[in-house]
């Protein structure tokens, strides 16, 4: 997994976040690279959503 | 002659309605920049996307919509209605600008096209200005517009919650355990976008509506990997299939055409098998909600005109205000005969998800809010001149219908209100005689300045 993808997961694990917050935290990463990293996170199949649209790490995956 | 997306950009340019930006722009800044511009915008250079340009906010006003349709602002509904009368079949071509560059298989990479983050609360980057084609063996070709949320380099979410022909096609395929092939064209002329917005009868091909609006056939080309056709002059095409997983994948929120941020929905996934585009592509950034709302207005208005005529009511003017997103409210003035205020309301409330209809006499200027308020104040008795219909078809993105109480894939209902603001039967018209100023026409202010 790329460093950006790992950083995104760590950020969401720390607290549920909006996509825009994740994008803001990676303004230094070229947008196509950020999208590739987001694709890696999506493919890891560990994301869930809360009622406010925040991304969170699904509890079962969190335990793992 | 059939006009292209580029022809429309030239029309905007010629009318002084297109602002060009030469400085390279970061895609993450485009949404805020387009929102600040009173004109449509054209970005000559996109940072990290060499070779791509971007046009956005094109139909941001009724004036620019009228420009696209080659008519006066008040005539857009009649112009669209005209397009429903003399359908023109598309014509197949062998070579197409939209297929000058072809990427399939492992070369498919949605991150390599300018996939913008549009709004603060969106669930991801979105494509909004889409013209999506699908087919059903029994009902034929369909075109509509659906938003696509970036998920991975070859997958997007797609909002297929609301009732539509493509949702129906998808359900039929889902019942067989099969995917539904779709092709997404971007950067097409507004006539194609209007045709896609129109809720055509299921056996009507929206390409023929677009052809009629153009007054010439839409050139189409066969897709590379799916059994579908797309407008040959498009800027960008995504080919692929909706996976047979039903409404199970998170999608949204997205800045909806209701002018609300929306919420997370459960939807199918679009897997992209092939990306084709022009050699010098222009990405279309459809600015929500305004472009969507202005594109919706003439479609809703034309449906209202048709409904009135089918009810043998003679319309004078009709308006789907942008405050109702060009979709939920219809205001019409009519040449009224006794009882037709109510007949007109019943007709207008039958249109799609219109939930508020107001009918006035022909002396009311429905484009003037003060004139409309005056009619509502003095021609309406609430116990006599309103109609409420319960349990009609609704739309999820209207928060007042509490769609969250539905299960995944469930369809909401709504109540509808009609207000007859025509002069009531039995009330003499002379009681509405307007004030006229003494000396009007004889005395001129400029003579005293």
Image (spheres, rainbow, N blue to C red):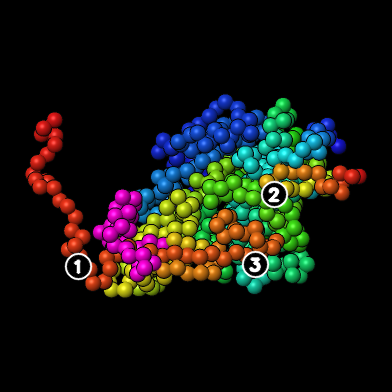
State the image coordinates of residue B8 (x, y, percent, origin top left): 48, 44
State the image coordinates of residue B347 (x, y, percent, origin top left): 42, 69
Q: Which mark is residue B428?
A: 1
Q: In front of the other: label 3 or label 1?
A: 1
State the image coordinates of residue B302 (x, y, percent, origin top left): 42, 61
Q: Residue furthest front?
A: B383
Viewed as shown, does residue A55 lie left or right of B22? right
Q: Which residues, given as a range, are shown in magenta?
A: B357-386
Distance, label 3 to label 1, CA atoms, is 51 Å
* Mark 3 or 1, nearer chain start: 3
Q: Which mark is residue B374?
A: none
Element at label 3: helix
Viewed as shown, does residue B82 lie left or right of B43? left
Inspect the magenta stretch and tell me whether residue B342 lies in it: no
Distance, label 2 to label 1, CA atoms, is 56 Å
Residue that appears at 25% across and 59% down: B363
Element at label 2: loop
Residue that appears at 32% across and 55% down: B372
Residue B305, by quadrant, is bottom left
């Amino acid at each position: 997994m790329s460093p950006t993808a790992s950083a995104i997961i760590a950020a969401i694990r720390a607290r549920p976040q909006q996509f825009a917050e994740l994008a803001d935290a990676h303004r230094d990463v070229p947008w196509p690279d950020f999208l590739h990293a987001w694709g890696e996170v999506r493919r890891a199949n560990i994301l869930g959503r809360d009622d406010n649209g925040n991304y969170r790490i699904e509890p079962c995956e969190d335990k793992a | 002659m059939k006009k292209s997306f580029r022809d429309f950009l030239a029309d905007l340019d010629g009318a002084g309605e297109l602002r060009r930006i030469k400085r390279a722009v970061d895609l993450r800044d485009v949404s805020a920049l387009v929102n600040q511009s009173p004109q449509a915008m054209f970005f000559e250079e996109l940072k990290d996307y060499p070779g791509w340009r971007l046009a956005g906010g094109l139909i941001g006003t009724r004036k620019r919509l009228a420009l696209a349709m080659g008519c006066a602002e008040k005539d857009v509904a009649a112009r669209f209605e005209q397009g429903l009368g003399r359908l023109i079949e598309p014509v197949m071509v062998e070579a197409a600008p939209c297929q000058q560059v072809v990427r399939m298989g492992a070369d498919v990479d949605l991150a390599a096209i300018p996939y913008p983050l549009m709004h603060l609360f969106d669930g991801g980057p979105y494509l909004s200005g889409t013209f999506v084609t699908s087919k059903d063996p029994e009902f034929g070709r369909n075109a509509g517009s659906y938003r696509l949320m970036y998920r991975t380099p070859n997958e997007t979410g797609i909002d297929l919650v609301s009732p539509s022909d493509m949702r129906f096609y998808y359900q039929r395929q889902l019942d067989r355990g099969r995917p539904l092939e779709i092709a997404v064209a971007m950067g097409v002329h507004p006539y194609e976008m209007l045709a896609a917005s129109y809720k055509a009868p299921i056996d009507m091909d929206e390409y023929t509506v677009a052809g009629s609006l153009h007054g010439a056939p839409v050139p189409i080309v066969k897709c590379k990997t799916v059994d579908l056709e797309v407008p040959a002059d498009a800027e960008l095409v995504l080919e692929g299939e909706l996976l047979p997983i039903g409404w199970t994948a998170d999608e949204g929120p997205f800045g909806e055409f209701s002018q609300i941020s929306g919420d997370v929905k459960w939807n199918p996934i679009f897997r992209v098998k092939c990306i084709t585009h022009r050699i010098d592509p222009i990405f279309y950034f459809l600015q929500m909600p305004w472009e969507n709302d202005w594109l919706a207005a003439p479609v809703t208005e034309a449906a209202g005109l048709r409904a009135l005529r089918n009810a043998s009511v003679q319309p004078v003017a009709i308006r789907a205000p942008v405050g109702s997103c060009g979709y939920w409210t219809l205001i019409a003035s009519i040449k009224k005969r006794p009882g037709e205020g109510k007949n007109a309301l019943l007709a207008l409330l039958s249109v799609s998800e219109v939930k508020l209809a107001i009918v006035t006499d022909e002396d009311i200027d429905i484009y003037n809010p003060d004139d409309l308020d005056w009619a509502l104040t003095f021609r309406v008795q609430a116990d006599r001149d309103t109609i409420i219909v319960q349990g009609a078809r609704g739309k999820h993105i209207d928060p007042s219908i509490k769609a969250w109480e539905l299960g995944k894939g469930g369809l909401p209902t709504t109540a509808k209100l009609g207000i007859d603001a025509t002069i009531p039967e039995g009330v003499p018209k002379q009681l509405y005689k307007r004030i006229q100023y003494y000396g009007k026409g004889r005395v001129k202010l400029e003579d005293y300045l």
